[in-house]
Each structure stands twice: as C-alpha cells, then as structure tokens.
Image (cartoon, helix red, strand yellow):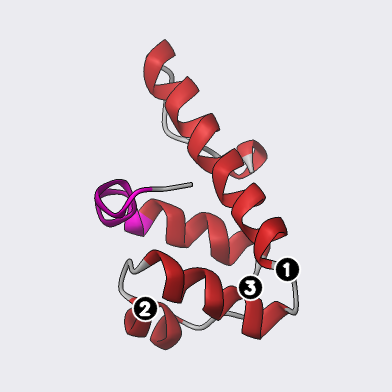
Amino acid sequence: MFNADVLKGRWQELRGKVKEKWGEITDDEFRVVDGKYDQFVGLIQRKTGETREAIEKHLSTIKWKHEAHAASGDSPLTKEDV
C-alpha cells in the first residue's frame, strides 16, 4: 500500500496510470480526492465496482514497478508497465 507521503509525491504519475486502467474517473474527481489514499480507493470502487482488494493490488503493482525502475536507473514507467 502507498503511504500518504509516497502518494502525494507521485500523485500526477499515479493519476495517469489509474486513468489508463480506469478511464471512467474524471479529472474533477481526481481533484476532489487530491492524493488522499482512502478517498482515492473509494472513488475507484464507486466508479468501477471493483473490490478494494483488487484496486489495492493493482496500485501496489504500480508502486512495485516504479521502485524497481528507480532502483535500476531506468526511465519512468510507461503504459506497458501497468
């Protein structure tokens, strides 16, 4: 799970990855949750009907991939990474 500092620091990147997977979430809705993890997951749940566990698993995958790229010195995540 993302901690609050990581989520705030990577909000724009994470937001883009989430929009690729769950495109039905609007920019206005992203602005409302503004990096607050529980509200963020709840928003995805309401919009998609997916379980909290499935959403958190996907978000953890994004985080893990980001950390692996950062450790290796690779470029930022791409669409194929998600």
* Picture coordinates of residue 31, whole percent (x, y): 33, 81
Residue at (65% x, 69% y) in the render? 22
Q: Residues within 10 Å of mark 3 (few under 14, many from 20)?
A: few
Q: Are marks 3 and 1 in contact (CB under 8 Å)?
A: no
**Label 3: which residue?**
23
Amino acid of disc 3: Gly
* Front residue of 54 and 81: 54
User: Helix, strand, or loop for circle 3?
Assistant: loop
* Horizontal side, residue 62 vs residue 76: left or right: right
Residue pointed to by mark 1: 51
| Image: 71 above or below 51 | above
Mark 2 and mark 1: span between their CA atoms?
A: 18 Å
Q: Position of residue 64 (x, y in %)?
A: 53, 32
The residue that label 2 is drawn on is 33
Range of residues picked out in magenta: 3-12
The x, y position of residue 49, in whole percent, is 75, 79
3 or 1: tag closer to the N-terminus? 3
User: Residue at (53%, 69%) from the top-left corner?
Assistant: 41
What amino acid is labelled 2 in the image? Answer: Val
- Which residue appears at 26% of the width and 56% of the height? 8
Mark nearest the camera among 3 and 2 is 2
